[in-house]
Image (tube, rainbow, N blue to C red):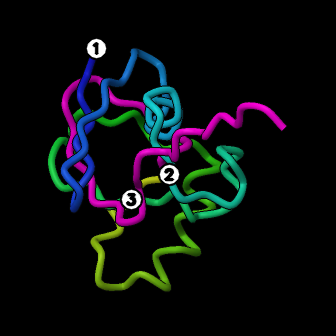
Amino acid sequence: MSELKVEPAGYRIDVRQGESLIEAAWRAGYWWPTLCYGAGQCTACGCEVIEGLDRLSARTEQEERMLRAAARSRRRVDPHRLRLACQVTITGDVTVRKPGVHPDAVPVRCEGG
């Protein structure tokens, strides 16, 4: 199992082999910004890799296509460090920057009527 550290909040999430970053976050009870819910059809889940570039899976064709468009609007981020959390898997500990990730709200259980 690998560890994903999400900055700026400092969350630490265990990632299973073959699991995408967004799947690991969801399994651990975190909300990760997305519009397509892991289908690789938006760039809302995009994150900047701070540490561990050598521990990432190769980009999928879908990810390449989406990131080409996103790189034009995110010029201040090195395009080699930009990845889609729904597409990338890791083989070791990695740190990413993704504002907006947070623990999911715990459902409130209503009793009575």
**Residue at image point 35% right, 66% down:** 99
Residue 49: % across, % down: 26, 54
Q: Mark 3 points at which residue?
A: 47
User: Viewed as shown, does residue 15 lie left or right of 59?
Assistant: left
**Stretch of the chain drawn in magenta:** 85-113
**Residue at image point 21% right, 62% down:** 8
Crowd tier of the residue under label 3, counting other residues whose Cα lies within 10 Å: few below 14, some 14–19, many 20 or above:
many
User: Of residues 29 and 98, which is closer to you in this image?
Assistant: 29
Q: Which amino acid does label 2 sit on?
A: Trp
User: Of residues 76 and 44, which is closer to you in this image?
Assistant: 44
Name which of mark 3 and mark 2 comes first in the sequence: 2
Q: What element carries label 2?
A: loop
Q: Name the residue under label 1.
A: 1
Q: Name the residue under label 2.
A: 32
Name which of mark 1 and mark 3 comes first in the sequence: 1
Residue 100 in the magenta stretch? The answer is yes
Q: Is mark 1 on a helix, strand or loop?
A: loop
Query: In this picture, is 77 found above or below 96?
Result: below
Q: Magenta span: helix, strand or loop, mainly?
A: loop
**Residue at image point 55% right, 56% down:** 64
- Cα gap from disc 2 to disc 1, whole angstroms: 20 Å
Which residue is at the far left?
A: 51
Query: In this picture, is 76 found above or below 11?
Result: below
Crowd tier of the residue under label 2, counting other residues whose Cα lies within 10 Å: few below 14, some 14–19, many 20 or above:
many
Name which of mark 2 and mark 1 comes first in the sequence: 1
Q: Mark 3 or 2, which is nearer the eye? A: 2
Within the image, what quadrant is residue 81 found in? bottom left
User: Which quarter of the rendered picture does the N terminus lie within?
Assistant: top left
Query: In this picture, is 25 found above or below 17?
Result: below
